[in-house]
Image (cartoon, grey):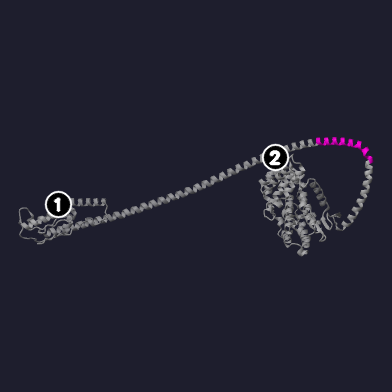
Amino acid sequence: MAFTRVELRCPKMLDPCPSWTLGDVLTEFDAFEATRLAAPPMPLKQPPKWADGGSGREKAFVMRVEEEGDTEDEDDDSDEDARALVAHGTSFSCNDIESSDSEESGDELDGRVTPYHLMEKRSLEKSILLELEREHHLKIQEEVRSKLSALEVCHQNEIQRTISAFARLQKYAESRKEIDRRLDVHFQRKIAEILDKHLSMVQRDHEQKSQIVERRIRDDAAVEEAKRREQAMKEDKIKQERTRQEAETRQKAAAKLAAEAQKAAYEAAQKEAAETEAAKLRAAAVSQNSVAHATTVNKKEIKSELPGIKVFADSSALEAESRRHALHDQVPSNIYLSKEFSKYDRQIGKSISKLMPTTDSVKARASELVKALDGHECPRPIACRLFADKIISIVKSRNPKDKTFGNLAFACGYVMLLVTNQVPEAMDYLLAEFHKVCVYTVPKHLHALNAQARNRDYYRLIGYQEENGQLESTEKYLTNVAAYVKLYAAMIQTEIKGVHHPHGLAEGWKWLAMFLNTLPATTATACALHAFLKMAGFALHKKYGSQFMKVLDVISRCFLPVLKEQGSKVQPEVVNNLQNYLNDKIYLEEPEGQYLAQQLLSKVFM
């Protein structure tokens, strides 16, 4: 005989919303407890009469429905009880089995499942009560859900308001930060401006103090220089007095010997007269041969140094050149080879090699050179000769084609002016060296009348240099001519306020006039003229104005047409450079490297 286990439907979860929190569950329990207490007590289930202890059949078969959550031990016990009932009972009674959802709901409210007695008989009233209880339970669930939904909506709204408030607060904080940042930037800018003004004032005060100190130093140096010169004058007077006394002594001794030598002198005079007569005859023959190769400048004869060469120059320029050469030749050209003066040559050369087109470099080099020329160990003429050789040889040591050579030439001009202002006799040595390396600084032009005259001596005479036993190329010769004339023009146009120039713009104006009046239009002369105007044209125009414009007009009407008529004999580049200088009015533009150096040095030497 088989037994069947019957279980009624019973929901395992009382809560229809599984997302409830613990607080929501407790609230729901409190609501149910209040509803239960408010309702009158009513028995929902009555045990069947046969289940009472004193009625019914004792040995009837009973079928029991247990909960799902029972353990295996409880199932075993229930099976044993059922077997006992089956053993003791003889009949099976299952009259009117009724089930109700209300009872299930009631069991769910109690939180446990009550076993239904399958033999129990239900009445209509009890069924209606159970249905009403179920509806009441559903109604309460719906109210709870609606309240929970309302609370959830309120909670979400509150969250949104909180988020919005936080966003507004964060936006306000960011705006305040931006305002504070702008205020900080504004205050920092104000602080920087005030600090800049303060530093400018401090720097201005420092510069003024430095100028005062420098002025005092220069005044002290001038006083010391005056004392030194005064002492030197006293020493010179003492030396002159001693020399005069020695001369008188020698004169007296010579007077005593004059009588004794008179006879011998008379005989020597006769012999000398005969030799002089013969020399005059030879000189007359030589002069007759060289008359054809002479030229007349300013209505005076100028004899050439070599036969077959025509000299174009002004007589006054030639006289100045001769005088400077005589002074220059008093010092041997190889004096730097002697052990006694070689160290001064190296010292001057080292100082000039460090020269750069900057204010500090010019000041330092000029100070070093003045100190070297004023030294008592080296005689003044030798020192001046060494200085002139080294400062002009900078054309060979530097690249004349470099664009920065113009700046370097202006720097050399300032150095030469500062040195010759302290040592005036150095200017003659400088000019003599200029005339030696470039005849156009005289100005002078040597023209060979025939092919025989164009020999190695002629090219050396006009300034060609030898390289490995060979004469340099014409292109390099013209580059050197332009470089030497640029250096000469830079020295002429240099002016420093408060510093006397022994060979300034007046000499440059005189040089330009003699150049145009006496020199012919050739490639070399055009190259020299363009280099001179490029360096000194701005300063000459600034000083002489309309007179300088007349000179440029002479160049345009007389010099350039003659130059162009020569055709292929003249390099086109030289003609174009001179023509562009006039057409573009470059004389109105300040040469590069002049203004800055002149401005700074003017401030320093005021």
Disc 1 residue type (three-letter): Pro
Which residue is tagged 2?
218
Which residue is tagged 1?
41
Front-lying residue, 451 or 70: 451
Counting from the top left corner in percent of width and height, residue 49 is at: 7, 56
Q: Secondary structure at mark 2?
A: helix
Disc 2 residue type (three-letter): Arg
Counting from the top left corner in percent of width and height, residue 455 is at: 80, 58
From the image, state whether disc 1 or disc 2 is nearer to you: 2
Vertical relation: 235 (above or below) 100: above
Range of the magenta residues? Answer: 237-263
Counting from the top left corner in percent of width and height, residue 291 is at: 88, 57
Front-lying residue, 301 or 174: 301
Does the magenta segment cover residue 426? no
Q: Is residue 123 left or right of residue 193?
A: left
Does the magenta segment cover residue 250? yes
Quadrant where the C terminus is found in the figure: top right
Other-residue count near label 2 (Cα within 10 Å), few / some / many at <14 / 14–19 / ≥20: few
